[in-house]
Amino acid sequence: MGPEIIFNAFTGLTDRQKEQFSRLGELYNYWNARINVVSRKDMDNFYLHHVLHSLAIAKYVSFKAYAEVMDAGTGGGFPGIPLAILFPETSFFLVDSIGKKIKVVKEVASALELENVEAVQLRMEQVDRSFDFIVSRAVTALPDFVRWVGYKFQSKSFHRLPNGILYLKGGELGEELNALPKKYRITVYPLAEHFPQLYFQTKKLVHLR
């Protein structure tokens, strides 16, 4: 399964975006053989499990040109790198505490000439900036994640979706959601409403604001 799954899900991509998405597979194959950032058994489903999953966020919010987005605990660059390709005028700040993963992110961003990506080795709780949105893919239990970054988004919103956290996670979320501070407003979106693949049947996007 290749980049065509992205082209089918997101029509209207430019030739440059199509080229960048097409190159992602080879770039991650190259770097993953040297620094393991994606499960090797998962590389056969790279575009479905990592790229399309990351881009699911774009089905709910279209980041504006002046927006600032932090990918907290980006790992090998997900969801930040695919989103940066899709929204080339939005600024993305990718952070992870593991230096070798940030090295891969920087190399991939450089190879794709993504000038809207800044990657830094840093613990997410150490970031002293605020953003319009904070995105992430299931890096930890949701209550811990919110404790670390739940105060780092700006209150004034310019998007249809209010500023806040956009957290991709699968499975049963009831216990984690119940453990969150009551001050947050929470909306859970099932990704299956946009993607028919079996992989997305239990996947969700949690929006906290």
Image (spheres, rainbow, N blue to C red):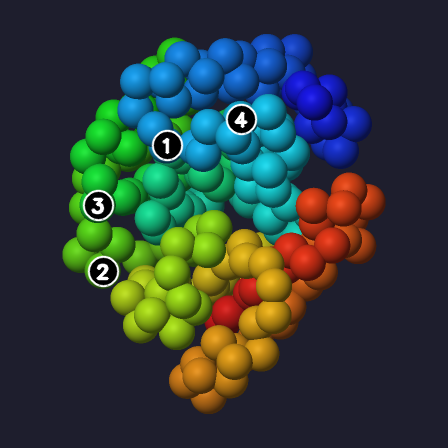
Residue 15 sits in which quadrant? top right
Local crowd size for mark 2, using a 10 Å CA cut-off: few (<14), some (14–19), many (≥20): some
Residue 139 spot, x, y in % from top left: 39, 54
Which of discs 2 and 3 lies nearer the camera? The answer is 3
On screen, residue 150 above or below 57 = below
Q: Which residue is mark 3?
A: 97
Q: Give amino acid for label 2.
A: Glu
Which of discs 4 and 2 lies nearer the camera? The answer is 4
Which residue of the protein is positioned furthest toward the front in this rendering? 41
Q: Which residue is mark 4?
A: 43
Residue 44 sits in which quadrant? top right
Distance of mark 2 from mark 3, alpha carbons? 10 Å
Q: Which residue is mark 2?
A: 125
SS at mark 2 in the image: helix
Which of discs 1 and 3 lies nearer the camera? The answer is 1
Quarter of the image with the N terminus in it: top right
Query: Residue, x 45% and y 34% (percent of image)?
Result: 39
Distance of mark 1 from mark 2, alpha carbons? 21 Å
Query: Residue, x 34% and y 48% (percent of image)?
Result: 73
1 or 2: tag closer to the N-terminus: 1
Query: Residue, x 64% and y 16% (percent of image)?
Result: 18
Q: Which residue is mark 1?
A: 37
Which of discs 4 and 3 lies nearer the camera? The answer is 4
2 or 3: tag closer to the N-terminus: 3
SS at mark 4 in the image: helix
Residue 139 seen from this side: yes
